[in-house]
Amino acid sequence: VGWGIRARRYENRIKVGRAGEIVKECWKEKEQNNWSDIYGIERERYYRERDIQRQWENEKINAARYNRRYKKIGLDVKLPNYLESRNVKVLSRGEEIRAKIKVRCDNLEQANKYWLEERQRLCTFCEEDWDCLEHYVKDCVKTSVWFADLGDDKDRVVEQICEEDMDRRKGEILKKLWKERERELKRRKEASDERGKNKK
């Protein structure tokens, strides 16, 4: 894999024109001969294996039982708008983008982690229902008010949050959800550690 990545970078440098004249001439000659030499054969095999690997990974992710949103995100499509470098630089909102990534990949949820005990998968804030985005938006007494600015139709708000676009208000809400959740989890861990020390 390492040599394939290096070879691809080298090819890109040649195509852009950041290589010597002899290398450019050699490259043109290889293109005219339809890559029939050993390098061309290895190159073709590398790209074929890489495509097979991507297909295999996409199938595994689509079949994953613990994250139903992966199918909507789609790995075979282009980079999401909020991750394009021009948007990241213009927006200068790294924390909000990190929160968006966590939401789209279900990393802010415990409900999809089937290996945890049932009580560990309850809402981080209210412990009344499953710890998932739908609960945060619709039912949670603490977090549902945060999402009120995005609209009254709660199902539409959930869809809107998972969509590719990223506006400032949505980013602020997701960042707040992420940070508050991290604070609450840290507080719980400290309380649990304290109880463990008191038992000894």
Image (tube, rainbow, N blue to C red):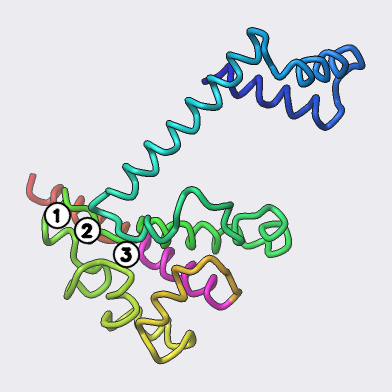
- Pointer 2: residues within 10 angstroms few (<14), some, or many (20+)? few
Between residue 77 and residue 182, name the one nearer to us.
77
Between residue 88 and residue 66, name the one nearer to us.
66
Q: Mark 1 vs mark 3: which is more N-terminal?
A: 3
Quarter of the image that includes the C terminus: top left
Residue at horizontal 12%, vertical 61%?
Answer: 119
Residues shaded magenta: 169-184
CA distance separating discs 1 and 3: 16 Å
Name the residue carrying label 1: 195
Q: Mark 2 vs mark 3: which is more N-terminal?
A: 3
Name the residue carrying label 2: 191
Q: Amino acid at mark 3?
A: Glu
Which of the 4 image quadrants contains residue 122?
A: bottom left
Residue at horizontal 11%, vertical 59%?
Answer: 118
Which label belongs to residue 184? 3
- Pointer 3: residues within 10 angstroms few (<14), some, or many (20+)? some
Q: How many marks?
A: 3
Q: Is residue 36 above or below residue 9?
A: above
For the residues carrying marks 2 and 3, which lies nearer the camera in this image? 3
Q: Amino acid at mark 1?
A: Arg
Which label belongs to residue 2? none
Q: Residue furthest top?
A: 38
Q: Are marks 1 and 2 in contact (CB under 8 Å)?
A: yes
- Main secondary-structure element of the magenta-colored stretch: helix
Q: Is 82 left or right of 100, judged from the image as shown? A: right
In magenta stretch: residue 183: yes
Residue at horizontal 86%, vertical 19%?
Answer: 24
CA distance separating discs 2 and 3: 11 Å
